[in-house]
Image: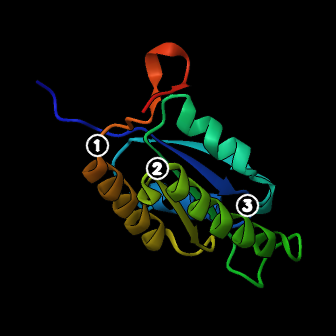
Amino acid sequence: MAEYEPKIITFLCNWCSYGAADLAGVSRFQYPPNMRIIRVPCSGRITPKMILYSLKNGFDGVWVSGCHPGDCHYISGNYYARRKFILLKNMIEFMGIEKNRLHFSWISSAEGVKFAQVANEVIKQVKILGPSKYFDKHTGGAYVR
């Protein structure tokens, strides 16, 4: 039987975190290929609905990464993101979903090493939790408990 490998959806800011992912790849820093990367203009554009939709439709974890606070190319997008993420993390814990299925980070485009380290840590933490058991992937995402 094959070892469980989690599926992680990763939303990366176009200006910083996506650049870090590119740098990590070009520099050949090692991290598992479990991630599906979606490039977004700003981490502030990610809505709680997008994150919950990802969990509902088969992803075992979600990672959102953007510019460091104060360095956003859209001035305050990452401040809005930070507020949303804090509230969402509390909400999913209240719903009974493990809070370690949801990860947030701030990585600049020059931090390829940090990107690889955080990617490995996210995958490790989600792998410990095992497959998501709160949404049934075979019934189109119906909530089961």
Name the residue carrying label 2.
Answer: 96
Residue 30 in sight in this render: no
Residue 43, disc: 3
- Pick whichever, 72 or 79, lies toward us: 79
- Pick whichever, 138 or 19, lies toward us: 138
Residues at marks 1 and 2, CA–CA distance in whole angstroms: 15 Å
Label 3 packing within 10 angstroms: few (<14), some (14-19), many (20+): many
**Residue 26 location in percent, x, y?**
48, 56
Residues at marks 2 and 3, CA–CA distance in whole angstroms: 25 Å
Q: Amino acid at mark 2?
A: Gly
Query: Residue lying furthest right in this view?
Result: 75
Q: Is residue 114 left or right of residue 63?
A: left
Name the residue carrying label 1.
Answer: 130
91, above or below 110, in the image: above
**Residue 100 location in percent, x, y?**
42, 59
- Helix, strand or loop at label 2? It is loop
- Helix, strand or loop at label 1? It is loop
* Residue plotted at (78% across, 60% down): 42
